[in-house]
Amino acid sequence: DTGKSGYDHFMLKEIHEQPRSLRQCLQGRVDELGGQVELDELAGVNPTSVQFVACGTSYHAALYGARLFQEAGIPAQAFLASEYVTAPPPVDDALVVGVTQSGETADTLSALRAAKRLGARTLGLTNVVGSTVARECDHVLYIRAGPEIGVAASKTFASQLVTLNLFSLAVTDDHDRESIGSLRDLPSTVQEILDDSVAAEVATAYLDADAYFFIGRGLNHPVALEGALKLKEITYRHAEGFAAGELKHGPLALVTDNTPVIAVATGDDEFARKTVGNVKEVEARDAPVIAVTDGQSDIERYADHVLRVPETHPRTAAVLASVQLQLFAYHTAADLGRSIDKPRNLAKSVTVE
Ligand code: G6P
């Protein structure tokens, strides 16, 4: 199939397109020196609080986005769109942001319409120009990932995370050079991962696993959730993502020597160290450990395998870690001979509630 440019699947092609799609996402929005973010689309948008609504992969991006705003001192929360409509919270002067790659997901549209009825201003963060979300929202922010054919989202997730970064930096008028510079460098750091990843070999080592558990803290919590969802969608194997701290409150009962634990820990702050503590607990129960790390903490001491990401700003590290997890899911599915671009029972965009 010529559309795949020599790749076995659209998903692998789209994973490898990320340096380019991220460059497009950043184009004209970050200055050359990395000191300023400019989003013309957001002129006049000054939210005092933000409610995100989304489904599936986009919900994981929304969880990440909510954390960025919280870190910047703006109250923010992410909601599953299908739940938001069951009891919409007071909107007051909140900006309600629908995160949706397709711009057509029925659950997300309903949540945005519910918010609108309550008087909220709405913003659509989407990939598709002219989509229903783009037309119905008061403001639109495009992620500019280009068309995605694989049903399981890959490049659009990375572009959502980056656009959410730009969004939070722009509305808080944050000029932090370190984080802006690390975003600007993302196309080349993602390329490094694509060139050097050992995810294919690691994936092959665990094809007989009973289940896969993904853990992460803070910004890496949504990364862990997304890693598990990706694996479920395209391999049909059981996978769960947890906040690293929650593992001991129940899921630990499921951990055995045949349930690999994929632990995402970047940086070496208090939170990364706590995740290392959680990893020690699973290692003591003989679970194989796959660490996704930039090498700053000592997580590697307890890991059977390492998926390395370059050292960078924590916000950006989460994007890089998610690329490693895309590759891990992809190669597991490829080894199992799955229908990667069109997984059973799933649709690219779901237009019923
Ligand atoms: C479907 C797709 C998922 C996607 C979700 C939300 O269920 O299979 O991959 O994450 O819809 O899609 P959206 O277009 O709203 O981001």
Image (cartoon, rainbow, N blue to C red):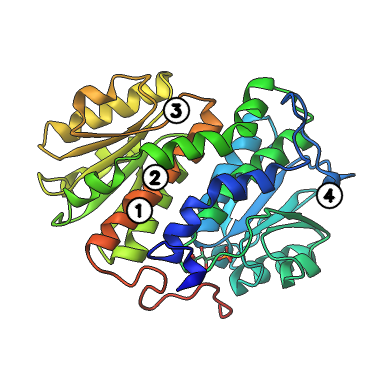
Please name the residue that numbered disc 2 is placed on: 224
The residue lying toward the viewer, choosing from 238 and 46, is: 238
Marks 1 and 3, how far apart in space? Answer: 22 Å
Task: Give the left or right position of residue 288, taking residue 37 as reference.
Answer: left
In the rendered image, the vertical position of residue 165 relative to residue 313, given as above or below: below
Q: Quadrant of residue 34?
A: top right
Picture coordinates of residue 121 (x, y %)? 81, 56
N-terminal-most mark, 1 or 4: 4
Can residue 219 be spotted in the picture?
Answer: no
Residue at left offset 78%, top offset 28%: 36
Count how many numbered circles sit on residues in the image: 4
Q: Nearer the viewer, mark 4 or mark 2?
A: 4
Please name the residue that numbered disc 4 is placed on: 41
Q: Secondary structure at mark 3?
A: loop
**Distance from mark 3 CB to nearest ligand 1 atom below 8 Å:** no
N-terminal-most mark, 3 or 2: 2
Q: Amino acid at mark 2?
A: Ala
Picture coordinates of residue 336 (x, y %)? 22, 64
The residue lying toward the viewer, choosing from 171 and 79, is: 171
Marks 3 and 2, how far apart in space? Answer: 18 Å
Q: Residues within 10 Å of mark 2 (few under 14, many from 20)?
A: many
Do callouts 3 and 4 mark residues in contact (Cβ within 8 Å)? no
Marks 3 and 4, how far apart in space? Answer: 32 Å
In the rendered image, the vertical position of residue 27 relative to residue 240, given as above or below: above
The residue lying toward the viewer, choosing from 8 and 236, is: 8
Task: Give the left or right position of residue 202, taking residue 42 as reference.
Answer: left
Picture coordinates of residue 181 (x, y %)? 65, 26
